[in-house]
Amino acid sequence: MFCEHCGVQNRERASYCWTCGKRLERKRENQTQTRQSQPFLPAPCPQELRYGPLLSRRMVLIGGVALAGALLLATGCGSSGLSPTASTSVSSPSSSTPQPQPFQHVALGTHLLTYKGHDDSVLTVAWSPDSARIASGAGGFDPTVKVWNALNGTTIYTYQHYVSLSVRSVTWSPDGKRIVTGGSGDSADVQAWNATDGGQDSTFELPSTLSIDKMWQVAWSPDGKRIAGACSGIDPNTSNSTGTVLVWDAGSAKAVTYYTTQSDVYAVAWSLDSQRIAAAIDNSVQVLEVGGWQTLFPYQGHSKIVWSVTWSPDGKYLASGSDDGTVQVWNATNGNTLSTFRGHTNAVRSVTWSPDSQKLVSGGDDGTVQVWNAADASLIFVYKGHSDRVNQVTWSPDGTRIASASSDQTVQVWGAG
């Protein structure tokens, strides 16, 4: 019989159109059914798609089932890490598109999915502001950024504008509309692009007066107006290491100010008011006033290279992770050490706060991810799902999940409690 909605012929006994999914109406007296639209239509896993007259009623309806996101996690279909195809493409969201339901809290450490879309070490990972998507970047054998569904692990698109540079850092704009990435190898390259479809919109200026070949990290200011980069290079005149905190205008991609030092700069973090930057410079962290570049105070609690620094969401504290194997928490106004976390057996590569500023998560060369109580430095949980170094950890903005990126070529997502 023919579908009154799209005109496609279906099997005589079919109840639903295999093309549009609408119910096939039969003219029967006193037998009219009304179906309510569902608020969220998650994309099905590629392996679940069917074509032709053998399409089952269950598969036609699966996109409208309200608990589809949870079912996808339970069946493990989200761990496929497949590249985008016609069946997995996404359309541009509109203001009328219903938002996905918030992800539910699950027990701390509960494994939710493993993303396997990369072919090299995953060096960086970042959540979208709405906690619905994740962007991850990999090393030079796979110099791509993958943007994927954080609930089921399906790849939404692949950004491929880096040729041979490792993608070391990725950051979302506060409004979720743009993504900026930093790539480095024999040179450095910072690019911005449309977060919806991966369309490149600008390449950020690297002043010729600066010696820059490594872009260790990029960070978007909370007010959305500027981008900061942690850079290092070799002075061609002296062959000495140089470091730069470089700040761009987010709209024009032009460099507006910078701070230089005679040591490598490995990480940067913005203050809540977007007026200060904490910069990891060799073995120390300096809190700098942006523009005037006055050093408000240095933090020198670490004995080896500091790889990560992060401001607490409430703006009161800073945390840093180092080659010395410790995570240290200190006062953001004067640099006084408040606590030292000693759970890792090797370098700490990444540390970040929970959205409520009550906990910390850290990852490092020992392959573990560790969750800490910020108040008393007590260890709450150790995640051991990776088989190689953990390069970055990040807490979802909604506070429900943690994502960890590893040299084992995976990103793993697990419950934050």
Image (cartoon, rainbow, N blue to C red):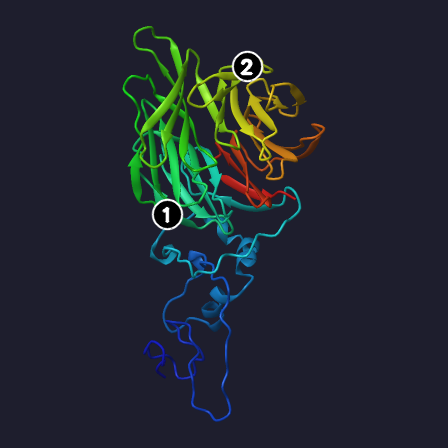
Residue at 43% x, 19% y is 292
* Amino acid type, callout 2: Lys
Q: Position of residue 37 (x, y in %)?
A: 49, 70
Q: Which residue lies furthest to the front in this view?
A: 292
Q: Position of residue 334 (x, y in %)?
A: 61, 19
Residue at 56% x, 29% y is 311
Viewer-nearest residue: 313 or 83: 313
- Residue 234 picture quarter: top left
Residue 304 disc label: 2
Q: Which residue position is annotated with label 1?
A: 157
Viewer-nearest residue: 266 or 59: 266
Viewer-nearest residue: 94 or 226: 226
Position of 19 relative to 133 (above/below): below
Residue 276 disc label: none
Residue at 43% x, 40% y is 173
Q: Residue furthest left?
A: 208
